[in-house]
Image (cartoon, helix red, strand yellow):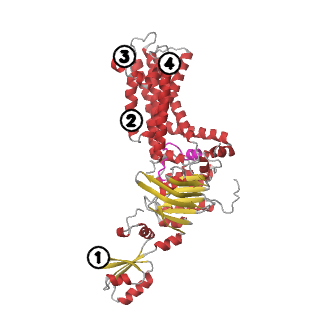
Amino acid sequence: MIPNPSPTPPPAARLSGVRKTYGDVVALDGLDLEVRPGEVLGLLGPNGAGKTTTIGLLLGLLRPDRGRAELFGRDSSSRGARARVGAMLQVGRLPDTLRVRELVDLFSSYYPRPLPRAEVLAVAGLEEVRNRLFGRLSGGQQRRVLFALAICGDPSLIFLDEPTAGLDVEARRALWRRIGCLAERGSSVVLTTHHLEEADALSDRIVVLHRGATLAEGTPDEIKARVHRKRIRCRTSLDRDTLRRLPGVLGVEPLVGRFEILTARPEPLLRELLSRDPDLTDLEVVGAGLEEAFLSITREPEADTVGEEAA
Amino acid sequence: MNDTTTTLAATGGFSRTLRILGLQTRAELLKTARLPAYALPTLAFPWLFYLFFGIVFGDRPSVGSVTAPAYLLATYGVFGVIGASLFGFGVGLAVERAQGWLLVQRATPMPPMAALFGRLVTALVFSGLVVAGLFAIAAALGGVHLGPLAWLSLAGILLAGSLPFCAFGLALGLLCGPNSAPAVVNLIYLPMSFLSGLWLPVEMLPSYLRAVAPFLPPYHLARLALARIGVPSPVTAGVSFAALAGFTALSLVVALWAWRRDEGRTWG
């Protein structure tokens, strides 16, 4: 590897001012994004936010309409740049009639300094099924094969597009541990997800995408602080306007005989509520779950119903 | 020259490229051989057709000094190699493209030509098996006697002749969806084979159909193959070669266009 003379290492990957459209649909609208060396970057957003398009552009599978996509300081479309990159794509289905070890061997040959096959199989948890045909594997095992192919070239940068989509809780946790191992080895990781919990568990930094633009960016704690909201539900004699003027209230909605009050700081508000209306009943504080909280910043205020987000 | 070259050069380029090509070809061959839905019909249909129409009902008058089983060996050979090429490249590619296998490979530093190379060798291997089987049937059951040179040159022209149809299959595979590909390929393959005189000698077709044949690529490959076993061709070899070369070039242009178009699509 050629030593870099500049004091700050260049970003592992970068999008600058990238716009990408599919026909009339604007997938990315002037997006700037940087993947720093050694970091785990979580790209968070609902379906259609532009996450997969972002990965496709960074990998050079798509060409931006405007702006520039780079891998290690080179244009993403250069195949040489991809020698240091591994990718687990969402759409990938491999031929059913190839064995796990044959796929690993094939993909390892593409890279200049691949990991030994035994190590790849061990890291991906595939030793026991290494002689099995891809088509005979369970869904979780098939995802792990895609993961193995992403890491077999010992890449410095790994893209994981919805790595745990369609996995059960146990398989998801297991894959999280494997992704954690990658970060410990010093690789940069970019992962997309629509679960805040997943981004929180794995990322050093989270970028929230919405409609092809950055909605928020920060550490998992900063993002959670931004989206951390509670819903207080109660039956009270106070009217809506009074409630609305209480300190820390972000919104008030009538809810079949009760009110639902949205706040970021529930404790002082509860104290205030109970002192003003000692007869308050049916009290309920709904901890807006992480999913729900995240949705509250990506959803439009008028469409403020939550809960149908797929697990 | 460019960064690809330097990367390859820096990491032991040539032997590594050979290794990629070897593994890619091995993977394509294994993948296809384990897929009975491709392997069986590709091999068995030409063999069975030739057995029925060339041998069992083959006691037709000879064309000049060439017996019907010998004549039909050449045309069913053309039929067989076209099938192996169109189904391997056309249908196989369309299905894998839709499943994202191509995309998974494109996301790696794999040289794009490696995938093409592996597929091409696989199509040639299957073409070779089709031809070998037909030759065995012809020699054992059809009483076809050719000199060693004639056998070799017939095999050579058939294998080389599969290349234009690999290019055509590539274009179809990049244009068609996974569900429509088998239907589209059959709709082109079967009528085109009949009209080119691959099933029945073109001389036996009604005159209005005979007029169509010279506009079809398989006709020209058949004429070249038939010339190897001594059937005089109404068109010169040069014309047939030019027709096949033009067909190949046109297919490659369409394939390139479809490949570019695909880029923005798979990610919609």
> What amino acid is found at the position of numbered circle 1 in the picture?
Val
Quick check: is B125 in the magenta stretch? no
Circle 3 residue: B204
Q: Secondary structure at mark 2?
A: helix
Circle 4 residue: B237
Distance from disc 1 to disc 2, alpha carbons, whole Å, reads: 59 Å
Q: Which tag, 2 or 4, sits closer to the chain's start?
A: 2
Circle 2 residue: B184
Nearest-to-viewer mark from 2 and 4: 4
Circle 1 residue: A256
Distance from disc 4 to disc 3, alpha carbons, whole Å, reads: 22 Å
Q: Secondary structure at mark 3?
A: helix
Number of numbered discs overlaid on the protein picture = 4
The image quadrant that residue B15 belongs to is: top right
Task: Give how far across and how far down residue B85 sits, in percent.
Answer: 48, 32
Q: Which residues are the magenta region?
A: A90-107
